[in-house]
Amino acid sequence: MKVIRLISRILVGTLFIFSGTVKAIDPLGTVYKLQDYFQAFNIGFLKDISLPIAILLCTAEFIAGFSVLLNCRQKAGIWVVILMILIFTPLTFILALTNPVSDCGCFGDAIHLTNWQTFVKNIIILIPAVYLFVTRKEIVPHSGITREWSVITIVIFFFFAFIFYNLRYLPLIDFLPYKTGTHIPDKMVIPEGKPADRYETTFIYEKEGLKKEFTLSNYPGNDTTWKFVEQRSVLVSKGYQPPIHDFIITSGSNEDITQQILTAKGYTMLMISKKLREADPEMLREGFELGYYFMGNVGEFYVLTASGSDEVGRYNNGIKYCFTDETTLKTMIRSNPGYILLKEGTITGKWSWANIPEKELISEKISK
């Protein structure tokens, strides 16, 4: 029985620690995923508190796993584990049936699971969790109550510090496709042999008031008595999707300048602000100053945003503003504003608003 308890503790504790840690590494990613769920379930009023919910969720997971694995207030940890599993297991079953959001987000962007895979994972981990809960009276405390709660408090403090470090700067580990060292054009290509999306196309024709569906193999193309009404295409099977598949940069005159930026010789700095109105004005001012220096001494400088043209029009400061999808900008960098340094399409540096690169650092980096 002791062996079964030990194995159960290792499985449950390790899973919860890992899940809490990857969410804490990228807390804004967890926020965005929660907002997707809130929108899907028509509870968008929770959007404004999505950050506190994200912090509470990943902290609860990590501390519960820590408690169970290291036998530090283990009974309390087991209670948290069983409550979370009993809440999320039926929830993930509903998500698997309805599929409002394709990726559950339970392991952040480190590991992507479908909703059905998440449900199966929860069912599997439910077994050792229930065993630990049923046999919780057999737990022998590791040390005194005061000492154990002191350890838990210290761990929570450092975990919070870890979360806020990743919020203020950038995620300690970048799980996203736009990590430093990435050559963006390579990540946009579908490798040879990989399957493409497969669609089933049907044609609706009408004859003497009767509408009928046809396929590509039998539609009456040469029969003029049939009148074409409409065409429908349904996705039958999802093909290979490259890691970067939605990277499009449009200029203020609606010109696609994506390739122009990715193939530009030398260095290009992208200042990314998903919504200009949501960024701190002082942080934007510092970014503009960097832009003036960069344009005068290094290379091209662009502001990428999903803000409307009216909002962009308020900034008539001689800097080039371009438009990109908001989801793409969130994926590129977890900061508003944030900075990405490109050299001929390769990401050579990333910074948040909190550690905006100094001019001397830029010059040193480029000289190397």
Image (cartoon, rainbow, N blue to C red):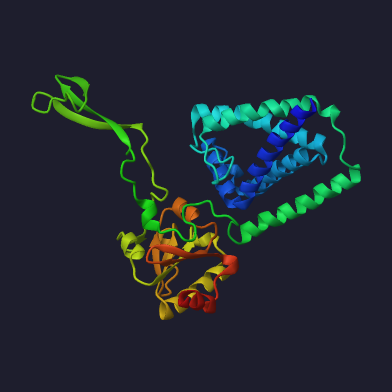
The answer to whether 84 appears left or right of 179 in the picture is: right
Front position in the image: 329 or 128: 128
* Placement of the N terminus among the 4 image quadrants: top right
Q: Residue at x 36, y 38 (%)?
A: 239
User: Is residue 24 placed above or below 12 in the rendered structure?
Assistant: below
Residue located 69% across and 41% down the image: 61
Left or right, 313 with reference to 33: left
Name the image quarter holding residue 168. Answer: bottom right
Check the image and report above or below for 193 versus 248: above
User: Image quarter for residue 265?
Assistant: bottom left
Q: Nearer the viewer, residue 58 or 317?
A: 58
Question: Camera-side residue: 218 or 320?
Answer: 218
The residue nearer to you, when weighing 118 against 307, is 118
Number of numbered tags placed on the structure image: 0
Q: Position of residue 335 (x, y in %)?
A: 55, 59
Q: Position of residue 305 (x, y in %)?
A: 44, 60
What is the residue that sits farthest to the front in this orientation? 3
- Compared to residue 208, the image places residue 353 above or below, namely below
Can residue 212 be seen in the rendering of this structure? yes
Q: Is residue 153 above or below residue 136?
A: below
Percent x, y for residue 143? 89, 42
Q: Is residue 248 visible in the rendered structure shown here?
A: no
Residue 226: x and y in percent read: 12, 24
Question: In the rendered view, does 341 fall on the left or right side of 52?
Answer: left
Residue 13 in which image quadrant: top right
